[in-house]
Amino acid sequence: MSGLVDELLAGKHSALARVITKIENREPGYRDIVSDLHGHTGHADVVGVTGSPGAGKSTLVDKVAAHYREQGHTVGVIAIDPSSPYSGGAVLGDRIRMASNAGDMDVFFRSMSARGSLGGLSTATTDAVTALDAFGKDYVIVETVGAGQNEVDIVRTADTVAVLVPPGSGDDVQMLKAGILEIGDVFVVNKADLDGADRTVQQLREMLQGRSTTGHHGASGTGTADLGTATGGDDSWDPPIVETVANRSEGLEEFCAVLADHSDYLERTGRREQQARDRFAAEIRTLLREDANRLLEAELARQGGLEPLLDAVLARETDPYSVVDEVLTPLRECLDRERPGD
Amino acid sequence: MSVEQEQVERTIRCLVAKVGLDGHDRGAHVIARALRDAGFEVIYSGLHRSPEEVVQAAVQEDVDVIGISILSGAHKTLVPEILDGLREYDAFDDRLVIVGGIVPDDDQAELREQGVDEIFGPGASMEEMIGYIREHAPER
């Protein structure tokens, strides 16, 4: 198994691909792999891109990746598509838009499906980012559909989050209010050549001004940064709004410049380290919960499973609180024995 | 690799690739959808892909199955290029390579010799194809 890690670190593409597969499938041994890779990470700039379906995320990501390549950087892309809740199958179509980087192996593009049941998309995504980072990618871009909780989760993985908004009725923007407006470090009105783009920019600006409380990334919304960078004090970040026409690369330079500005801002203010701390804290807590749950399930099974206990509860011979107490007693005793000092 | 009991059934990943100048992708769309409904994850390449692009996609996506759809008659040049590319990136051995389209009998033998696992012609049913993939998807 460690052979795979060595191959990945040596730059073998198929090894990187296989590691991500193992991460996705939660295959035996994937944890050891991610553990081994962790020491080699921390160099990549991670950008999250989200927005409603059809906003132009894939096209923009393609152009941004090409832009970074022109500057001599290497890029990893993780594109997440929904999977069918019925068959579990999925058609992962984001790759079709990767025309600008076709045949360029230094853009590592990987499609992932949001396999609902496998213990959380965010964990798998985070681990996949770890693999790309350890591989030596300068930039990692995570692209996800904006339709629920998962997008808020990518914040935990990304240093900078870009939210794409297509020009349209005000209702579309209203929809973004819940959750997604708070996670954006940069807002992009893509397809800015379409009617209504100006209005969408205007609406976004108004809404961002209303964003007075600190968002997830600690932006404090004062002032009216438009196409710009952090205004106000050094410590605040006003999310700029950038207009792009991704398929014609219009506004691309500006978008990349804004991403770079945000990266500088994170560095300058020490936010990057704080974000990393928060991210690892959340990750450790999640893993702790998952593993503790598994331990508990195993212990429950060892004690004969839930069924007999349910019978007793139904018959009013015992109650849920007492059941939990009893189930946990051996664990508690174990801990007491191990740590008599506490 | 150790086998753990709790392991869930592995999701089979397929690349459906249109290669070369042939611009007919209705069949590829139908196949992509059928494979999805069979519970597979399908990566669709889009039209007019070069062999290098197909190799890039197959390697990076770490697919179990590469389905190459060719109706243009250029299979004799394009398919070997893909196979060579897969070998170059050490991504040939544990992968199923399937060709779909119109391939004359004489060419079929040649393609198989070069490393193609199966060829499905115009009369093949989706059930046949899905059954074949389930049965032959590589152990990893």
Image (cartoon, coloured by chain):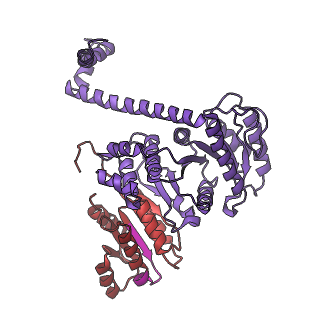
Query: Which range of residues does the magenta coloring cover?
Result: B66-77
Residue A336 versus residue A93 in the image, above or below:
above
Rendered location of residue A159, percent (x, y): 57, 42
The quadrant holding residue A234 is: top right
Specify the chain shown as red: B
The quadrant holding residue A178 is: top right
Residue at the (67%, 33%) spot, across then down: A219
Residue at the (79%, 46%) spot, across then down: A199
Residue at the (29%, 26%) spot, across then down: A296
Rendered location of residue A10, percent (x, y): 39, 57
Residue B68 lies in the magenta stretch: yes
Residue A48 versus residue A191 in the image, above or below:
above
Rendered location of residue A323, percent (x, y): 28, 16
Q: Quadrant of the C terminus of chain A?
A: top left
Confirm whether residue B31 shows in the render: no
Rendered location of residue A101, percent (x, y): 56, 65
Left or right of A287: which side holds A200?
Answer: right
Left or right of A86: which side holds A149?
Answer: right
Work out whether residue B45 or residue B93 is closer to the camera in this orientation and state it: B93
Specify the chain shown as purple: A
Work out whether residue A271 or residue A88 is closer to the camera in this orientation and state it: A271
Confirm whether residue A112 shows in the render: yes
Residue A140 versus residue B78 in the image, above or below:
above
Left or right of A154: which side holds A306?
Answer: left
Residue at the (57%, 46%) spot, across then down: A48
Residue A10 lies in the magenta stretch: no
